[in-house]
Amino acid sequence: MLLQLDDVVLRFAGNTVLENIRFGVEENSVASLIGPNGAGKTSLFNCITGFYRPQQGSITFGGEELLKRKPHAVTRLGIARTFQNVRLFREMSVLDNVMAGQHCRSRAGAFSAILGLPSQRAEERRVREICEECLEFVGIADEADRIATNLAYGHQRLVEIARALATQPRLLLLDEPAAGLNSSEKTELVRLIRRIRDERGVAVLLIEHDMGLVMEVSEHISVLDHGRIIAEGNAETIQNDPAVIEAYLGQDEDELELT
Amino acid sequence: MATNKVTTRPAPGAIERLYAAFDDPRRRWALYAVIIALLLLAPPVVGRYGTVILTNALLYVILALGLNVVVGFAGLLDLGYAAFFAVGAYTTGILTQQFGFNFWLTIPFALCAAAIAGVIIGGPTLRLRSDYLAIVTLGFGEIVRIGARNLEITGQASGLTGIPSPSVFGYTLTGPTTYYYIFAALAVLAVIAAQRLLHSRLGRAWLYVRHDEDAAEAMGINRVRVKLAAYITGAVFGAIGGVFFAANLGAISPQSFSFQQSVLVLMAVILGGMGKIPGVILGAFIVILGPELLRDIGSLRLLVFAVILLLIMLFRPSGIWPGRRS
């Protein structure tokens, strides 16, 4: 397992948000985390990426314990993420946004920047090339110089993915990447997720409400409900699992697109 | 700064045109050449008094560019910036006057002292939100000033006098015109440094942290380190201003580092448009030259100046320099 969670417990003010989570993502795979709203999916992401501190348990990534690490240190180890509601840096160009991802893979400080040392210039060039390649990969290279927040929504999501890829991760966490996308954009997204796995060798873990997309792209699906994993397996197993159907039947109509 | 003939497009306004000129690399160099020529030619034109005022304006350009790193780039409020200016000036003052150091040798000490001061103010305040940060930085500024007022080594309330003039190759640096050119050179270097920082890895990181701390952290940026770097960088700019300020006047006292100075520098930054380098330079000139240009109206000048500042902020709340467009 590339990522392994064991007995993770997260509580907020006495409320148990995540209970004894045991969960893993394999190298070079696409896994999904589904579940009704409020089940704790994003909280689980936040535990992995260091934004929340679980009270108990262990989270290991490539053999390294993540639990006591700050978010930036987790990213440096090779886990990148996107956000549920797109969070691009305002007033900055698409390329400048993506270059954020390369920060942890470069080193130049104030001195070398002020003096314009050759090493700093070379590093800037390298960072730029890597980021341009990431934009090319997600297919929006021609928009590199535009202000990121002026892009069409679907493209803003792609910028976020490019920015995450620019951290050169081994695992990419996508929080509802299909939300707000139209059907052709969703098709593109499925293709992109597969290319991320196949061409870049990056494992993908996604939280997603679009069941069609989840079933199509994931090799492994985990279902979270009220802070517990209630089912795990491939698409077929999940669709026929009585506990899953039960969890979703208790929910709104629009969550019922299981089959 | 009044170089408007730089664009052929039907332009929306003088400032926008000037801004467009800065955006185009070829015109930018032409514009820089004009500005440098103006800087070089100014002293004989404006006379002795005018040269002194311009020197002060150039000092404020350096200070404002330094504070702009903290406030404009990294988005951290600092109401005690004069403290860093004081650290630079007093380090040079004490080392030259009381320990007989050569002026040039005091510069590395002043820079180190400023960096340490930056860590002292930055370290404990990084977890604070802006309003608390304002109070703490305000307090820090006052601690430094009151400390200087009461310590033996800083000459207490009367300050330090008789700071020797530095010399280069046997030539002693004295006189308003000499210092005008020194500050002009320093200001140009400060602009280049600020520009290079803004377009560097660290400069971008400051903007990321200012816009969205969590997203920046998720991208692998250590926010604590990046903010600390902003305080230290800003402190170093302030200290360089202070070092040459001490050399220029030959005497320093706590009054030169009051809360008012901090506010004036902050005003230059906000007026010009936080984070925008040309705007901040313009802001520094406005806060220093404004009251001087209004000298003719006598006792009402500060009132009139205040009204003008209020009007600017009302009509251009994000500063006189226009924001970047797509």
Image: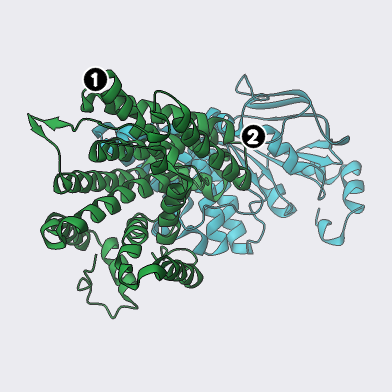
Q: Amino acid at mark 2?
A: Thr
Position above or below: A155 against A66: below
Residue in the picture at 57% in, 45% down: B134
Instruction: Bin the neighbour count of mark 2 within 10 Å (Cα to Cα): few under 14, some 14-19, many 20 and up.
Output: many
Q: Amino acid at mark 1?
A: Gly
Residue B87 pos. (x, y %): 39, 32
- Say if labels 2 and 1 share a chain: no
Q: Colour of chain B?
A: green
The CA distance from mark 2 to mark 1 is: 55 Å
Residue in the picture at 32% in, 56% down: B281
Of B5 and B102, nearer the camera is B102
Quadrant, the C terminus of chain A: bottom right
Residue in the picture at 53% in, 50% down: B211
Residue at image mark 2: A49
Quadrant, the N terminus of chain A: top right
Q: Is residue A237 left or right of residue B193?
A: right
Position above or below: B57 against B255: below
Q: Which residue of the protein is positioned furthest toward the front in this rendering?
A: B158
Q: Which residue of the protein is positioned furthest toward the left in this rendering?
A: B170
Of A148 and B268, nearer the camera is B268
Res. A223 image quadrant? top right
Mark sitting on residue B100? 1
Of A210 and B107, nearer the camera is B107
Residue A143 pos. (x, y %): 42, 59
Question: Can the viewer see residue A117?
Answer: yes
